[in-house]
Amino acid sequence: MPSDQIDAHHHLWKYSSKDYPWMSEGMEAIRCDFLVDDLHQTLSEAGINGAVTVQARQTLIETDWLLQLASASKIVRGVVGWVPLVKSRVHDDLERLASNKKLKAVRHVIHDEPDNFFILREDFNRGIALLERFKLKYDILIFERHLPQTIAFVDRHPEQIFVVDHIAKPRIKDGDMEPWRRALADLARRQNIYCKLSGMVTEANWSSWTESELQPYVDVVLTAFGPKRIMFGSDWPVLLVASSYKGWVETVHRMIRSLSDDEQQWIMGQTAKMVYELD
């Protein structure tokens, strides 16, 4: 394993029920603050020495706060923030925020939008079209059912780098592979698309998931994208409703152990460093 291992997907927050209404029953373990000191201890215990923090609220206030935390932290290598991509002021917001070199990408919570075709909205796509000039990537957060329209979406932006979060959230709990497998393979044919090996245990049964249950989904991702377009992520602290942090790291190591050392290094750090241009 490389000396520089990167968690490409985690969150930080100061908890309040008003700000995080999605933390439903059964998520009591994460209804508290998770800050940089907590992150540092958690990563150190698992041998991870760098991370990318990802937005959890759709506010500019949070994006500014995450950038402030990242600027004061060596372990937080980059931020995936939120900006109002559908608003007319988005250029000014991007210009201001992108002046902070720790902003590496932006994300919108597509899968929470009531419109299943939100990703194809013209105003949203106008915002996406601005990202390349600011050298920003875009993280795609969707459910399996959004994959067909996501393919149409990325084809509108062939020069933009996209990163699929949580392997596009297949229905692991139900044991279903289709149509996720076919659609993900289709999406992966675009060479500007990358994928995070993250968020899987929370799509499975939180209390009874097994490694053998996850392995077929990992194998699909490996076949579709190849190691150089896959990056490890934890989705900590959301992860904690279904696994310990160290337990997830060890699980991923085992699920990719058939790969060469070089291929494992890409997944565990090199891909994230390349895509997000991490120091």
Image (cartoon, rainbow, N blue to C red):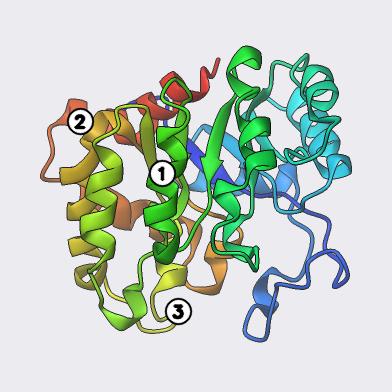
**Mark 2 = which residue?**
263
Q: Residues within 10 Å of mark 1 (few under 14, many from 20)?
A: few
Name the residue tied to disc 3.
206
Question: Which corner quadrant of the image does residue 86 belong to?
Answer: top right
* Alpha carbon distance from label 2 to label 3: 29 Å
Viewed as shown, does residue 78 lie left or right of 208?
A: right
Q: Is residue 47 visible?
A: no
Q: Which residue is mark 1?
A: 152
Residue 46 position within the rendered picture, expressed as x and y whole percent measured from the top left: 45, 47
Q: Residue furthest front?
A: 122
Total numbered labels placed on residues in the image: 3
Q: Position of residue 25 (x, y in %)?
A: 67, 86
Tell which circle, 2 or 1, labels the residue nearer the N-terminal end. 1
User: What type is the residue that disc 3 sits on?
Assistant: Trp
Looking at the image, residue 139 lies above or below residue 177: above
| Towards the viewer: 275 or 43 | 275
Give the class, few, some or many, for how many residues have Cα within 10 Å of label 3's Cα (few <14, many ≥20). Answer: some
Q: Residue at x 53, y 19 (%)?
A: 278
Rendered location of residue 218, percent (x, y): 24, 55
